[in-house]
Amino acid sequence: MSELNSSTNSASSSCGSSDGESNGVGKRAQRELKEEVVKDMAIDKMREKMDSLVHKLEKDVERKLDLLVEDLVGEVKLFNLKNYKLRELFKESSSSSISTADGGSSSSRGRNRSRTGGKLPDKEFVARNSLLTDLFEVKHIKTIYHIFVVILIIMFLNTVVHDFVDRGRINLGFRPIVAGFGKFHIALLLWSCMQIATLCVYPSFCLWVFVRKDCKKNESRKVWDISSIFGLLFYQCTFVAFVIKAVLWLDLPPASSVAVLMEMTRFVMKVHAFVRSNIPRALEKTTKTAPEDKPAYAVAVPSFSKFIYFLFAPTLVYRDEYPRTKRIRWSVVFRHVLEVIGVIFYISFIFERFLTPLFDRFGHAEISSGKFVLSLFGSVMPGSLSFLCGFYCLLHAWMNASSELLRFADRLFYRDWWNASSFAEYIRSWNVVVHDWLYTYIYKDAVEHVFKDCRFLATVLVFTVSAIFHEVILAFAFRFFFPVMFVQFEFMGLLLMFVTRNMSKDVGNILLWLMLCIWNGIQLSLYNMEYYARRNCPVSGESLVDYLIPVSWSCNGISHNPNWTISAPWELN
């Protein structure tokens, strides 16, 4: 019995131990199973994260590839366009083919097309570089640019060294800048007021559209339309009168006055372009039933953001949309701003070194006719150089800098006017921005609606409007009426258009450059003479006659030198 019990106990103990071992193995198995499940879940989560990350990367890569492809296609198109323009520019061809190829786009070709449907072609905007931007990629043209930079440095050193040796002090050539751009902070404040006044045009235009939509009778609409037209004319005239009065009352210096008056002209042209471009759409939309969820002005008037962009865009022709670049290249902006500053100093050196010594004594004493002639011809080269510097500063550096900031892609601000063989070609190519406004809103409307296909009268109207605006800027900037610019535009310009029309390219180009140099010299000398004569021999200014009669002719004016003789070269010894 005892042996049976012991065996039984041993058997039971062995069973218990085996059960314990089996339980331990089961727990380990469960633990391992749980760990495997956790690992599988972690792997699944990692796989999901990897899949989402890969999917996101694929989207980013596809998007970047799309952008790269678009940039590549755009660069290829631009490369082909530039090569086409450069090939046409550097090869000998007729002026008509050059003017066609120069635009390199439907804009230029559209100007050369014959009219369709009794209407002249419209301005078209295309993404393109300025011509000098492409030309500077040619190393020979880039070298000429470097030469101008070196000349600027030499003129700066010449001014500093000359004044240090001659007068014992250093003159950095800043005096024309300081004298010309004085009270510039006041000019900026006046510009802000002009900007606010221009912004009021948009709600006024919306009000016109809204009221016109509610007018049920045609008679009421006509009365409202006529009243609005007179209101616009009154606003434009009041705006111009206010700015001119402010310039005179604040006594702004010449350069600051020119800047303010040019901005005044720009705002007037912008307002006219916005209203003139949107009137046809407004008339069409207000005569039809507008969608119920949108008011009339929302259908017939572009958004306020488009109006704001147009006010700052470097164009005077209104469009709802313009070709835009994808990003702002700040290095390009910085380079062009430096060019603007450098050219301003360049012009300052020219005035300081070459022009001021010629004219600063006018009005103190009588000037002999010989000295007058020498001063006149002594202004030709400085005047031509100032003309080229002003062109580069305003129409290339400044316009390209503003275009880059606004991502404005169409940068055809000028064409190859230096290759022009006729005055008409020069006028079309010199300042494309202003020419497009004159063509779109003056010439085109005059031909189609006013003079009925009489292009000569339309051309005279364009020259008259341009001459008046130029003369207003100069007259109120310098505080005297001396219509040299008006005569050059209105009479000499029209005469040259017919004289140079049928000339050969070489003769026409030489004559054009000769006239440009002489005109710039005459204009610069006459305005400088009158400006310094009024400073050195001031008038009372109590009557309008004081502003109309040139002081340089009446107060210590030009005396005739009777000792002029002409001798043959062999008689000089």
Image: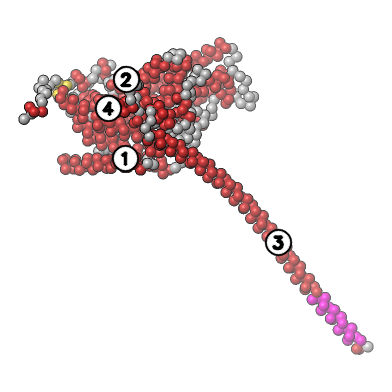
Q: Position of residue 16 (x, y in %)?
A: 83, 78
Residue drawn at the location 66% of the way across and 57% of the way down:
47
Q: Amino acid at mark 4?
A: Leu
Pointer 3 residue: 40
Q: Position of residue 480 (x, y in %)?
A: 27, 21
Tell me the distance, in whole angstroms, between the alpha carbons under discs 4 and 2.
14 Å
Q: Mark 2 falls on what kind of element?
A: helix
Question: 382 or 530, which lies in front?
Answer: 382
Q: Which residues are magenta?
A: 4-21
- The label number, if any, that marks residue 514 in the structure image: 4
Residue drawn at the location 25% of the way across and 42% of the way down:
154
Pointer 1 residue: 144
Tell me the distance, in whole angstroms, between the alpha carbons under discs 3 and 2.
92 Å
Give left or right: position of 226 versus 485. right
State which tag comes first along the sequence, 1 or 3: 3
- The label number, if any, that marks residue 499 in the structure image: 2
Question: 331 or 366, which lies in front?
Answer: 331
Tell me the distance, in whole angstroms, between the alpha carbons under discs 4 and 3.
88 Å
